Amino acid sequence: MFKNVTTAVLLFVSILTGCSQQETKTYEGNWEGTLANTNTLNFALVLEESPNSSYELTITNPESTIREKLVVTNTERLQGSIDDDIHFDLSFTSDKTAVTGFIKSGILMYHLTLHKIDEIYKGVWNPFMVDSLQSQAMYLGVENNEDGSLAMYPFYGDQRFTGTWVNGSEKEGDAIVFRDYKTGLRFRAKLLEDTIELETLLGKQTLTVTNFKRSDIDLSTLKPSGPKNQNVHKPVALNDGWIIASTADVGATSTSLSKLIDEVNTNALPNTHSVLIAKEGKLVFEAYFDGHNLDISHDQRSASKSISSAMIGIAIEDGILADVDQKLYDCIPKEFQYTKDALKSKINFEDLLTMSSGLDVDGAASENNYQSSDNWLKTTLEAKMIHEPGTHANYGSANPFLLGVSLDQELQSPLELYMEQKLFAPLGITNYIIQTENTATTPYFGGGMYLTPRDMLKFGQLYLDKGKWKGKQIISENWVIASFKKYRRLQDAKDKNEYGYLWWHKTYTVGEKKVSSIEARGAGGQYICVIPELESVVVITSGNYRNRKLLQQPENMLEKYILPAIVK
């Protein structure tokens, strides 16, 4: 998922035009500043009714206030925009006690809920995912380009935020303006004599101004600044559907789990963010590290491919898609039908679900090719065929990307609303973010969603219980069974894993016992492990995006510490 992004906290190069070679030499190096407030990038939202069947949405941080009118559409949704950058698409619940929907900003769709309090609706929006920054520090790396212009790389002291991605810039008076296409925030940089003055903006509204001075800090050494762990005991009881128990209540042991916590805290298992275990339908273990907590939605990377698989199953059950034998080109827009040939015409949904389309779009180099293009769909469909469909599996993101395009084409309503209605709302999942593909309008089925670890665990429990959550059938049992079958081996995976419908298979060894796990996996160490024979689900989140030596750390944790605790 976005393999052309080499670091999670790195901003893509922002070209600062109009700088002479002398200016370039003057500003090259690292710069350090301080944000005015730890809540500068957290917003309180208030929605109030105003005259003429419209509503006013007030967005407030400690330094500024923005007001935007939302208009009721003929579909009874509240919609509005800020400077064509940030879009609101909300609707009232049936009992009018809340407003739910999405803020679409950058390439992210932030799901939010505003609750009715004293005749107005209140909620929060956290563009950086965290509920409050742990550090007010902000940094800029400034480098020379060969043409004499500058490239700027902003970093934040709170390393729980996975970073902003900036591409391109433009002159605005004596300043350079550039946009973070991930979160939708804008920046305006003024290059002064011995400082850089950087405004952070929402649309055209200034949120905060940060002044930067030169610094000797090595930006590659930035580490999380929060407490190491917050909760390593019995999980917290919340009104989120989870039954809380202890490991002893379900016959599990805690010795190896205590050892796991020690290893994380001594950095023997670096960049581990959370470990959660559900057994026999109960949440029995919940630990957070490096400042993470149960309220922070975590970058799933490719682990959300398994959520994409669930949506395809739901759409087939609803009759929106025919079945897994339906051909891809049945759902491809007319303007791209020219890419169809004798081999491509055979590609069906099962081929896409099993990474077996035969298109030359998998592997790091090929993914970089389509994800760095101006039109992902055109580039993907124009790729040559290198295998007969359904015969050879190579792991990648383009196959599920095509599934998302196909479903979006067949729906009468926006895909994100369908996902909310059919999966997230029934699971009681509210704190999540959907990443879009390059159009910034359609959910990307190749990965990149954000969910809290407890909600990741819910999704795994849904599959463990054959599509049911709290007795309600959300996904058909037949789809779960089909998803967990072993179709092919991933030829480009280190372990040549067997693969289902966007689910990995792995067998672990605990003493003399073999334990099978079906897993959603994401880069950096995001795992949802469904273990039917142990009636268990395990979730691990991590931040090892830049260290390939640690890619299999969650598997090692599962085999060495977690499975020994829950195997009877």
Image (cartoon, grey):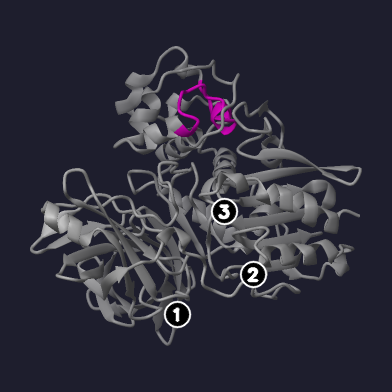
Residue denoted by label 3: 423
Residue denoted by label 2: 240
Would residue 383 be found to the left or right of residue 286 on screen?
left
Query: Which of 505 and 533 lies nearest the eye of the viewer?
Result: 505
Q: Which residues are magenta?
A: 347-364
Task: Identify the amino acid type marked 2.
Answer: Asp
The quadrant of the rendering that contains the C terminus is bottom right
Please name the residue shown 36% across and 20% down the image.
Answer: 339
Between discs 2 and 1, the one toward the N terminus: 1
Q: Which mark is residue 116?
A: 1
Instruction: Please tell me how crowded label 3 is: few (under 14), some (14-19), or many (20+) other residues with Cα within 10 Å.
Output: some
**Residue 353 part of the magenta segment:** yes
Residue 221 placed where, x, y %? 47, 61
Between discs 3 and 2, the one toward the N terminus: 2
Q: Report, in whole angstroms, how far the alpha carbon at label 3 lies from the one at label 2.
A: 15 Å
Would residue 22 be found to the left or right of residue 288 on screen?
left
